Image: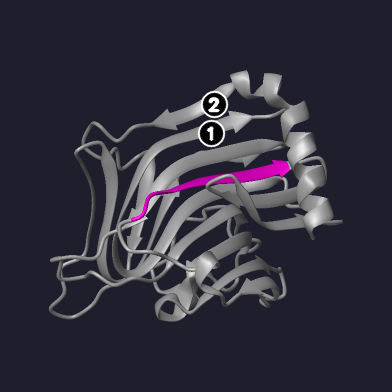
Amino acid sequence: MRRYCLIALLLWCGTASAQEKLIFSDDFTKPLDTKVWISEIEPKPDAVSTVSTKNGALVLDTKGGVTVWLNKLLKGNIQIEYDRVVLVDSGKNDRLSDFNQFWMATDPANANLFTRNGKFEAYDNLQLYYVGMGGNTNKTTRFRKYLVNGTKPVIKEYLDAPHLLQAGKTYHIKIIVNKGATSYWVNGECFFDHADPQLLTSGYFGFRSTWSRQEVRHLRVWQLD
């Protein structure tokens, strides 16, 4: 694992010049553009759940599950970067859990990906990569690949505190799909990498959470080709 993380870092460094091709960015300084960002929010009785922008952040404040999709098909070698924090203080939906993300997501049965209601189980029949940081009320951090047959095997899992969440801490996330592999980086550390013989090279990116209040800032998407 450590050896491949080093290889992944060297490959990333080798493509540094290609990162000049910025293909999307959002600093969330304007009201949320619902054509660019597709929010799927799980309905919960007597709950107030919202996705909005505030003070230069995308805010996910929900009692149930939520996925916020970037409505842009990503292809080939890409890098996604953003800052993200889980807020735990006075909010009604505050809970330290489920700092999650989907990438290279497609629906094998439907050309339109954006048809779901925000419940986590509703995404089981997609094909994608997934990282759930601090899942199960901040007990697990897992990397999965969702397969066409409806299974979603855990490729790697952490249970130790350094790989779980801290309330109010800003995490700089980097997701790379490049040269036959995908990797997930947190504050410069490679948490997960996967040299995938059936690499997913086309799909959509989405922020995912369940019952929490989180902020996302400074999203950048780079084409590495």
SS for dot 2: strand
Q: 66 or 184: which is nearer to us? A: 184
Give the amino acid type for the residue marked by disc 2 in the picture. Answer: Ile
Q: Position of residue 36 (x, y in %)?
A: 38, 38
Residue visible at 51% across and 47% down in the picture: 173
The residue labelled by disc 1 is: 221
**Contact check, label 2 and label 1, Cβ < 8 Å:** yes
The residue labelled by disc 2 is: 23
In-image side of 192 versus 31 (left or right):
right
User: Most prominent secondary structure in the magenta stretch?
Assistant: strand
Q: Position of residue 211 (x, y in %)?
A: 30, 72
Give the amino acid type for the residue marked by disc 1 in the picture. Answer: Val
Q: Does the magenta stretch include residue 152?
A: no
- Magenta-highlighted residues: 169-177
Q: Position of residue 95 (x, y in %)?
A: 29, 72
Q: Does the magenta stretch include residue 174?
A: yes
Q: Position of residue 20 (x, y in %)?
A: 60, 18
In-image side of 94 versus 65 (left or right):
left
